[in-house]
Image (cartoon, coloured by chain):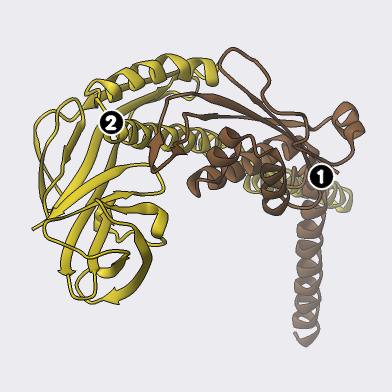
Amino acid sequence: MTMKNRNKGQIRVIETILASFIIVVALSFVNIFATTPSSPRYEATDLQKVGYNVLHDLDEQGLLPRFVYKGDWGSLRAALRVTLPSDVYFNMTVYDLYNTKLDDATIFYGDPQMFATSKNIASVTYGLVGSPIKIGAAYQAIYEPRVVILRLTRG
Amino acid sequence: MRKLIGHKKGQFVIIAVLMIGIMIISIGAVMNRAVTYYKQEPWEEYLTLMGSVELSSRRLVELSLANYTNAINPDSNILKANLQKWQINLTRIYPGYGIAINYTLANQLYNVYGTSIRYSLGLNYTWQKPSSFSAANATFNLDINSVGLKGYRFVSVAFLNLRILNVTTDTNEIAVAVKREDVVPVTGLGKDNFEVAGLGILKVSSRYDQQYLVVYKIKCAGALTLPVTVRLWDTRGIQVTAKYP
């Protein structure tokens, strides 16, 4: 009787080991197929979100329209460098509605080769409606849309 | 008999192996779904687009109000004209999304933050009073066909209120309170934002006030005589002119 009970105990231990083994194997199996957030498959989408958020924040603070309509590309570049993570390279171009390029190609950060070779490049399009310009004491506020295209890649 | 039992054990092993296999695949499938599920939701992608369009539309309402209040001959149709252009240009700025925006301009008496405003084509200003204001109001309906979004409604209100609280002729000082949408006090205004009719401004300082939260004190360069007219431009370029008394 005592021997039988001992045998039952051993079987329980074996069962537990087997169950643990199944779980470990299952988790290892999952890891092969899991598409984690850092996967290159989502890289472009993630960068796109980062780009949108950065442009939206700069617009919310009134910095983006101010820099774009004043043509202050140096300040715009500095603002993007401060706001974006340091390993994210960017290339921004500003157009009017007739696709005329307005910036002087200096809103750029990173290795130019990366934009030519990288597989994961995100492109964000952002619209601006205008910005009031102070003339004397009063302001001139004209509807003058601009299209901002921000390209991002990870260095 | 023994052989038969042995055979049964063999069957049990096969069934057990199959069951273990099913378990591994099931757990694997569930885990894989759990890890990757949130990425399949497209809401984050179109939320950013909606946010951009909403912010740009609000900016356009503010810009139109700035134009309306700064013009020598104000064009009461400016907001409508700008929004019509915005409707067309939006599809050029964001091609391929199937974006369509419709608007309705406020055109009657509204109670905005405790102030009665009678809008005409979404615009109104009431100036030359101790408490003066400029206001604009438009309601938008946004569709983004590429993500199946229909009828996302938002209201864009631009509002600037200038209230002359007190004029002290002895010290040539004017106390004013400035509020914007949601009766939020406007901070960070300086000498460049104000103009006192017929007088220069020496200094503009602000202090905390229990009722108005922020009160600006305008120190004038010459002798103040009543009535006093104060003009204000905020950082959005919107103008208001108030007169006291």
B245, above or below B158, in the image: below
Distance between mark 2 and mark 1 Cα atoms: 83 Å
Say which mark, if any, is on residue B68.
2
Q: Nearer the viewer, residue B144 or B180?
A: B180
Say which mark, if any, is on residue B155.
none
Percent across and percent down for residue B133 are: 19, 47
Label 2 marks a residue whose chain is B
Q: Colour of chain A?
A: brown
- At x 45% / y 31%, what residue is drawn? B53
Please indicate whether residue B150 sits to the left or right of residue B125 in the image: right
Percent across and percent down for residue B106 are: 17, 30
Q: Amino acid at mark 2?
A: Tyr
Q: Could you tell me if residue A43 is visible in this image?
A: yes
Q: Nearer the viewer, residue B1 or A155?
A: A155
Label 1 marks a residue whose chain is B
- At x 22% / y 47%, what residue is drawn? B241
- At x 81% / y 83%, what residue is drawn? A3
Q: Secondary structure at mark 1?
A: helix
Please indicate whether residue B165 sits to the left or right of residue A54 in the image: left
Sequence-wise, the earlier of marks 2 and 1 is 1
Q: Secondary structure at mark 2?
A: helix
Q: Which residue is mark 1?
A: B14
Q: Could you tell me if residue B113 is visible in this image?
A: no
- At x 30% / y 61%, what residue is drawn? B185
Q: Colour of chain B?
A: yellow
Q: Quadrant of residue A121?
A: top right
Q: Quadrant of the C terminus of chain A?
A: top right
Q: Quadrant of residue B38?
A: top right
Mark 2 vs mark 1: give the one in front: 2
